Structure formats: C-alpha cells, structure tokens
Amino acid sequence: MFKTYISGPTTIVLVLLLLTGTTLLAAPQATTQQELLQQLQRGIDELQQGNLEKGLEEIEKVIASEPRLAQAHYYAGMANAQAKQWQKAYDYFVAATQQMAGYGDAHMQACRVAYSLQNYEDAYMHAVWAAQAGIDMTGAIAGLEAVAAPPSDLRRRLEAPRVLIGPIDTEALFQQEASVFGGTQTEFGAAGADQTGSARADPFAGLVTPGSSGAGAGGETATGTFPMEIGAAGAGQLAQIQGEIHEVRRRFGEEFVRSEEFGVVSNLSLASHVLFIKVDDVGEGARLPLKGFVKLFDAKTQEEVYSRPLELTDIASVSNLRNEIARYLGYMEVWITEQKR
C-alpha cells in the first residue's frame, strides 16, 4: 500500500555524466554546469551515508544556484521524505515536475506523499501524470480508489495521446549546429523557411530523449529505494537552460501536462507525438516577441501531422506567456479531438 512506499533502507546510486559536445551555453557556464553536478554528487553521497541534513544542505545549494534543475528538486524531495517531512517533500516533488515535463518518478513520489497527507485529489492528479509518463500506477490507483472516488475522466486521461516535448530549433538565432538535446541541429532550407517552417532534414535526427530517473516504463521503483541518477536527463537539461527560450519550452511542457487531451512522456519510445518548436526571431527591448512555428510529428512514422505559425507577443512576461501558450495548446486540443473522431 501507499504508506509503505517511502520507508525502509535507502539505496542511492548516482551516475555523474558531464556535458560533452557543443551546447548553446558559453564556455564559462559549462564550468558552472560541471560544478553543479559535482555538488549534487556530494549531496547524494551524504544521503547515501545517512547524513540527511548535510546532504540536503548541499542539494539546496544547487537549487539556489540553478532553480531550474529538476533533478535537484527531486533529490531534495526524496531526502525530506526520508526525514518524514511530508509537506516539504511534496513541494519539492511538485517543483521538479514543474521544471521537467513528463518527470514520471517525481509525479509518482508526489502521488505517494499526497496520499500520506490524505490529499487524495492531488494524489489522483499525480497518479495520472505518472501513468501518462510511462510508470505503471495500477496498484497506486487501486489503492486510491479504495479510499476516495476517482475523477470522472480518469480512464480517458490515462489513455490520452502522449507527447514528448522535443527540441527547440534556434539555428536562426544562434547560427550553430547544436541542438538543446546535445545532438545535431535540425537544418532548414534557406528558401521559404520563414514562410513555411518546413524542415529540410529529419527533426528526429540527433534527438536524444532524457529517460526517467529510475523506474522504467514497466513498473514502479522498488519499495524503499531511491532511484537517484542524473544521467543524460540531468546533463541534457542543464544544456537546455537558455533564459527565455528555455522558459518557452518549459511552459509548453507545463501546459501539455495540464491538458485533458494529452499526456507527457520523457522517452521517445513511449510517445505518440513529438512537439517541435522552431524559433525564427526574438525581438529586443522590454518586450520580447517571438516568431516561429509549432509542430507535432507522429512518433512512429516521423511524419509532420500538425503545424501552426507561432507568435508570442512577450516571452519575458510570465502571465502573458502562459496565456498565449495555453491558447496554442487549445488549438492542438481541438485538432487531436477531431483526429479521434
């Protein structure tokens, strides 16, 4: 049952994977990335040795330096859960999911802690998101159904098409062949690219999907263990952090997670569609308008199935960005509903 999920001995394994290859970050930042990962390593080492307070202190320093690193929030949540600080643990798990769309393990742990807090509405919500991300939540949902009625749309949401939030093509801005996933940048034809957004090369080329940090698609993490790995997901996410451009991608992921028509995964093999964003221009000044294209590709056939010009009036404004991206998601929800018919 839920109450035994976060208990027992702690097993922590950290694979420290430093960034390799070219990224869109400047060289001085690359050193900071390495230092952040090393500091996170130190925090995990302390947790492994049973020094929860010292380990959490190291991890919180990482969060203070780079609050957008989802794995750091996740590990802080695990440490607080081990210390039975349930509300703090829940808040950290939620923060992790806000920074990485489709972070199945964080949703799973948030579900478990919400259950312990008897917050069954939130427990159901995270159970759905964890299941959409590819984690087997059958037992967790059954446990919830024994104590609280499920949402009326539970089954429909569990069966929703799953989207991988793919790369943002910023070649028009940065003029370098390095994608935010660390692979080869998708190339676009010079003629007509701004008008059609059509890809000359396969947008799947070089796409490296960050895996879930522990439990695989086949089942939940074993009781009482901490699936603590940075791996490609942590290193890859550090490479994606690019100020407002990063925030555009994150907001798209956040809106897809909230959608009643889509689910979000972090592994290409689990996806039915891949979201691809092309940025052609970002204005200057106090307002930062962005122009480009938003596309959906079929994950199996790798064919483009949906495309729409993207115009965001001010990507520096949090409320404005959220509202405008929600509008574009609405367009895609209408499209996917029509496809189901």
Image (cartoon, rainbow, N blue to C red):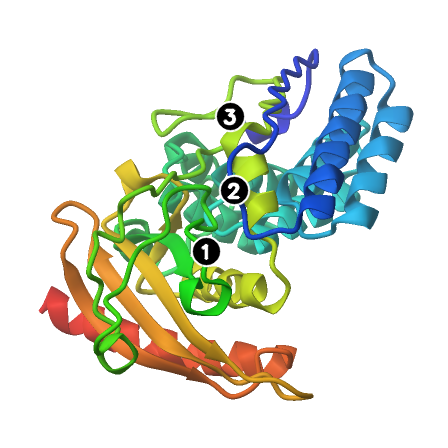
**Residue 61 screen position, x and y as percent:** 85, 40
Task: Work out how far the residue at label 2 is from the one at label 3, CA to CA, in angstroms.
Answer: 27 Å
- In the rendered view, does 201 fall on the left or right side of 245? left
Label located before the other in sequence (2 or 1): 2
**What amino acid does circle 3 point to?**
Gly
Query: In this picture, is 339 found above or below 181?
Result: below
Give neighbour class at mark 1: few <14, some 14-19, many 20+ (Cα, 10 Å): some
User: Which image quadrant: the C terminus?
Assistant: bottom left
| SS state under label 3 | loop
Write down the quadrant of residue 195 in the picture: bottom left
Query: In this picture, is 136 found above or below 293?
Result: above
| SS state under label 1 | loop
Q: For residue 33, which numbered disc appears in the image?
A: none
Residue shown at 40% from the left, 54% from the top: 167
Label located before the other in sequence (2 or 3): 2
**Residue 98 screen position, x and y as percent:** 59, 55
Task: Work out how far the residue at label 2 is from the one at label 1, CA to CA, in angstroms.
Answer: 9 Å
**Residue 42 screen position, x and y as percent:** 80, 22
Q: For residue 214, which numbered disc appears in the image?
A: 3
- In the rendered view, does 277 fall on the left or right side of 66? left
Residue at numbered disc 2: 22
Query: In this picture, is 295 found above or below 269?
Result: below
